[in-house]
Image: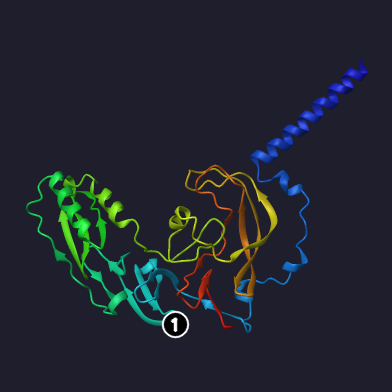
Amino acid sequence: MKKITKKNTIITLTTVVLCALLYINSCTDFNLKNLQYQSPLPIQYKNYRTLNSLVSDSVFEITSRLPAPAYYDSLNNNIICVNNYPESDSSVYYRMNADGIITDSLHLNDEVDYESHYLLNLDYYYDWVLTGDKKKQQYITIENSNITTPEILDSVVKKIFQQASATHIYYGDYTFKDGKIEKSENAFLFLLGKKWYKLSVDKDLDKYTSQRHYYKYNNNRIRNFCIVDDTLALPYGLTAANFKDDKSIPTVPFYVAYFHREEHETEVSGTMNNDHGAFWDGVAYINYVYGTDTLKFKNQYVLQMDKTHWASWVKYDYCPEVYVNPRLNFIVIGGYMVKHKRK
């Protein structure tokens, strides 16, 4: 009888311990994986330092932080950088040439969108990127008195979309004033030749059918220069979506050579756009290879994501963003300009 009682006691205690560990692992910040033995940092990575502490040597020149590269002007081989100041609703745009030298700037107090080398606002636009002219440019108005039905609007918009080299859409909002609904107009912008045209229409006429034309005729245009893929970087003036669709594009020789795990975080929840499952917090040891030379540095507070079934999964999060283009004589890593000086 005593043997049976002792055996039941052991089973009960074991069950309690397992349940407690399961609860701690699932419902608290503690994770059993943190009890696992973590290998010490391999000796070849002990001399890696952060970018801001690296001293430029005879091979790589590293300069201080830059305005954020935002757009690539492929016509003039320039980078358009921007500093935003949300507290004052102002921005400063900079033009940087292929050697990384700032040659001009434009201070704006209004929000603008970038489209095909132009800075667009609902009421005016700037061609400064291409011409250096800092004056506001006025849109050429497209007559709209004959557009009285959604079908007529769709026909007109489709025809102009086919002729335009670039397009942009501003959608108006519904607002309440004095107990009445007021609606602003929708504006369709078309680049015909070197001038932008504007078609304003009643919001109720547009049933979003025009979006089909926008995505059909405008979706393949290069806009952003910011390039990041599942590992770290992409090579050309393309977006991450371009890379995922075209597996023939070679990756830049810029990669995480080693990731040193420090702490495992329990699984996080979220939507399909931001759920990455559990992850390791640690330090990424990164190599950038240029010919026979390699820039070696470390990046702290990087996350190594446990893969999930979500489409948004990436292997590493919080790695530095990389800006690369083969026509430029520099790259930007995490806001630092890096030049290869050896020819």
Q: Residues within 10 Å of mark 1 (few under 14, many from 20)?
A: few
Q: Nearer the viewer, residue 302 or 7?
A: 302
At mark 1, the secondary structure is loop
- Whether residue 178 is visible here, answered yes or no, is no
Q: Position of residue 44 (x, y in %)?
A: 75, 68
At a point 62% along the width and 47% down the height, the residue shown is: 306
User: For residue 11, what is the image quadrant?
Assistant: top right
At a point 72% along the width and 44% down the height, the residue shown is: 32
Q: Is residue 72 left or right of residue 15?
A: left
Q: Position of residue 158 (x, y in %)?
A: 20, 52
Q: Nearer the viewer, residue 32 or 145?
A: 145
Q: Is residue 188 left or right of residue 129?
A: left
At a point 76% along the width and 48% down the height, the residue shown is: 36
Q: Nearer the viewer, residue 164 or 174?
A: 164
Q: Position of residue 58 (x, y in %)?
A: 63, 84
| Quadrant position of the N terminus in the picture | top right
Q: Nearer the viewer, residue 185 or 42?
A: 42
Name, please, the residue furthest toward the right: 2
Q: Is residue 87 left or right of residue 164?
A: right
Q: Position of residue 114 (x, y in %)?
A: 32, 65
Name, please, the residue furthest toward the top: 1
**Colouring style:** rainbow
In this view, 269 is above or below 284:
above
User: For residue 253, what is the image quadrant?
Assistant: bottom right
| Quadrant position of the C terminus in the picture | bottom right
Residue type, label 1: Ile
- Whether residue 21 is visible here, answered yes or no, is yes
Q: Is residue 101 left or right of residue 305?
A: left
Q: Which residue is denoted by mark 1 in the rendering? A: 101
At a point 77% along the width and 29% down the height, the residue shown is: 15
Name, please, the residue furthest toward the front: 248
